[in-house]
Structures are given as C-alpha cells and as structure tokens.
Amino acid sequence: MIQIAVFSDVHGNLPALDSVLKDIEERGISQKFCLGDLVDFAPWGNEVTEKIKMLNIPCLMGNHDERIAFDIPVVPLSKHSEEETNARFIAIDHSKRNITEENKIFLSALPFHMKVQYKVGGKHWNIQLVHSSLSSNDTYLYESEDDEVFDLMLRESQSDIIVMGHTHLSFKKQLENHKWAVNCGSVGRSKEQNRLASYVILTLDEEKITPQIVQLGYPLEETVRKIEESEIPDYYADFLRNEKVPHG
C-alpha cells in the first residue's frame, strides 16, 4: 500500500499550509504534491513559496502563480461583485509588489501539469495532476459536470485518476472502470461553508485507488488578523470568517 497527499490553492495562507503539512506528517505520509496557487489573498506569498521550495514539494503553476510570475494584467470576472472585483485588483497588486525576484523566477518555472505512476505489487497506477484541467489552469470544473467531461480527461491523459484544484470546492467522483475525478479543495481559501483547510489522501493498493478528502481547522484568526494589518483588503478577512459569499 502507498499513500500520497495532494493539496492546492494555498493563496498565501501560511498558518493553513503549516496545519496541513503537520497533519500529513503525523499520518506518516512522505509523498506530497501541490497543484499550485501559492500566492494572493493572504500576506505570506513569499513564505509559502519558500516553504514549498525548502521542502522540495513538486508543485504545479496555478493561474495566480502565472499572473504574478509574468505580471499578467488582471481582468475583471463577470461572476464577481463590484466589491470583490475591487478587492481582487488590490490584493493581486499587493502580491506583485511584494513577491521577491527569486520567488517570481521560481513561480515562472513551475510545470503546467504532471503525471506520476506508482507500482503496487503487479499494478501500475497512473495519476494525472492538474491545477484545473489538461489544457488550462483557469477552467472551472465542478462535481456537477457530466461524467463525460472527466472521462475524456482520463482518456486523454491515459490515467486512472485525475486530481485538480482551482475551484476551492472539494469532491470525489467515481467513474466507470473504478476511475476517479477528485478535487482536493483549497488549503488557504476554501469556498466551502466550513472554511476548513482541505487536501486529499490517495491510498493505492494492488486492487484500487481510494481517495479521502481531509478537512481540518487552522489558526484562522491569525490569518484574519494579518490580512487586516496588511494592505490586502479586509474583504478577504471577512471571506475567511464566512461573512462574504463567494461567487463561482
């Protein structure tokens, strides 16, 4: 049996990341992967990036990482309210101004997606890791998608399971032939009602893959306080307190 942990969407929330990494370590899981979005919306973008580097955790490039690394202009999203749109511009600008050049270079060199294979007994398991989809790091795929959407991704990637992030909403969906589509949720900016830090554990044995979504509390008020003390809009502190409703 092999266990691996997959997490995503830290968004500068160092206390949440530390809590997830501690939980993974306490479970004795050594294999870890991150699906990207290390930066934006909480004030520890540099510290989160440096921790991923220091621990040598394989990490993908999320859409926020790409925007910060290459200074891509922010485009308003129709799903956002005027308040969220304004807050988003300020928060992303804060990241662009505060990210170190070394970390910017690191983000710019992250891979777009990753496929790993594990051998358990006589069985080879193919695991496809993406930030949001095979062709984009900014596509929103939810549990409500038709099975065919995920079946196509599994066929294209020739994998047994595809694990994604980006939407900040976790799910696990079993498809035909014992294949899976899984969203590991968000470490640092969950859009789920509980606002807990979320990640997934994949247990591989010779017969099957079993995904388990793990959600845990972290020092949320520490994150909230640091946001309020920074130039990041208080909108994101209110969001973490579940006083703001996310749109999409």
Image: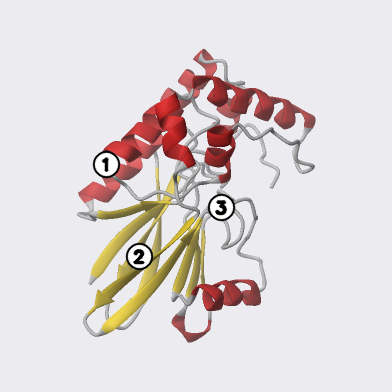
Position of 95 with respect to 211 (left or right) is right
**Label 3: which residue?**
169
Residue 220 at least partly seen: no
Label 1 to label 2, Cα distance in Å? Answer: 20 Å
Is the residue under label 2 in contact with that under label 1 (CB below 8 Å)?
A: no
- Find residue 174 and report its horizontal and vertical position in percent: 50, 75
Circle 1 residues within 10 Å: few <14, some 14–19, many ≥20 = few
Which of pointers 1 and 3 indicates the residue nearer the eye? Answer: 1
Callout count: 3
Vertical placement of residue 134 versus 34, above or below: below
What residue do we see at 76% from left, 36% from top?
Answer: 76
Q: Which residue is drawn at 51% across and 21% down?
A: 227
* Residue appearing at x 37%, y 28% in the figure: 47
Amino acid tagged 2: Leu
Q: Are marks 3 and 2 in contact (CB under 8 Å)?
A: no
Residue 149 visible, this angle: yes
Residue placed under numbered mark 1 in the picture: 55
In this image, 46 relative to 79: left or right? left
User: What's the distance in space between the residues labelled 3 and 2, CA to CA?
Assistant: 17 Å
User: In front: 22, or 77?
Assistant: 77
Above or below 227: residue 197: below
Amino acid type of the residue tagged 3 in the rendering? Leu
Q: In which quarter of the image is residue 148?
A: bottom right
